[in-house]
Amino acid sequence: MDGTGPVWQQIGSSFVQHYYRCFDTNRLLLGDLYTDSSCLTWEGEGFCGKNAILQKLTQLPFEKVQHSITAEDHQPTPDSCVISMVVGQVKVDNDPVMGFHQLFHLKNVNSKWICTNDMFRLSLHNFG
Amino acid sequence: MDGTGPVWQQIGSSFVQHYYRCFDTNRLLLGDLYTDSSCLTWEGEGFCGKNAILQKLTQLPFEKVQHSITAEDHQPTPDSCVISMVVGQVKVDNDPVMGFHQLFHLKNVNSKWICTNDMFRLSLHNFG
């Protein structure tokens, strides 16, 4: 989407690409995407602040991980932020592929787009 | 969740309950939950403003609809808003149950919590 579409769509899409690239190659890089007031809800469990979030994400118990995005939606908020919702699939080590969905709320802080809110859920328990 | 947990969780949880109750009984009531600057992305298609959103939601081609929530997550944003992410199942007329996920961004406007941003996706095409 880079270079086309409304600016908030480019912001959301670029962030999402960057996020999963970092996640799948070097999770330590994800620390730069959060601040001390960011919130993460991971499978229903809450983590507040960059350090707690980074600790959770880097200690997830797998070696290899690969995300692929099925669909992503982006919108601007009334407070000049951007919300992104991603649905996709994730493969972890030699486990079967799992569906997931994830939400990001992005805010421009000191000329950089950071993630203030992050929610992640596997789709495992939601089949019809 | 009403009456327990942080206030933003009560706000999100109450809104989500109210939203699906309206959706499943009388979709016309959903108009009160949006403003003229609200955005809806429905299965990737965008609708802006209360009228366009209400038109989309009321013209969805089914008679009976029933949502059930599998999990809901809520967080406060830095701008005193609330974000909610819902994953659940929806049964439409006599079709098989389908998984869905939906995001709401809620803002307090004139002492009322309204939905400024709404994104909905069926989970149909995201199986491993």
Image: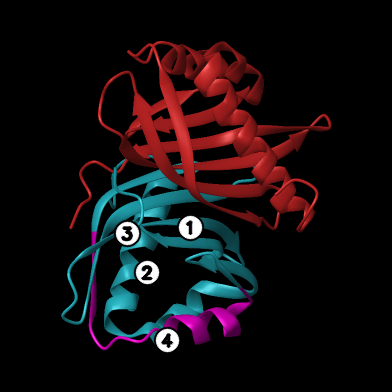
Chain colours: A cyan, B red
Sequence-earlier tag: 4 or 2: 2
Between A14 and B122, the residue placed more toward the observer is B122
Residue A124's label in the rendered image is: 3
In 3D space, how far apart are the residues under numbered discs 4 and 2 (Cα atoms)?
Answer: 13 Å
Location of mark 1 (residue): A104
Q: Depth check: A38 or A58 in front? A: A58
- The amino acid beneath tag 1 is Phe
Which quadrant of the structure image shows residue A68?
A: bottom left
Q: In whole angstroms, how far apart are the C-alphas of marks 2 and 1?
A: 10 Å
State which region is magenta. A47-68
Q: Position of residue B104 (x, y in %)?
A: 55, 41
A46 inside magenta stretch: no
Residue underneath mark 2: A19
Residue type, numbered disc 4: Thr
Earlier sequence position, callout 2 versus callout 1: 2
Mark 4 crowdedness (10 Å alpha carbons): few <14, some 14-19, many ≥20: some
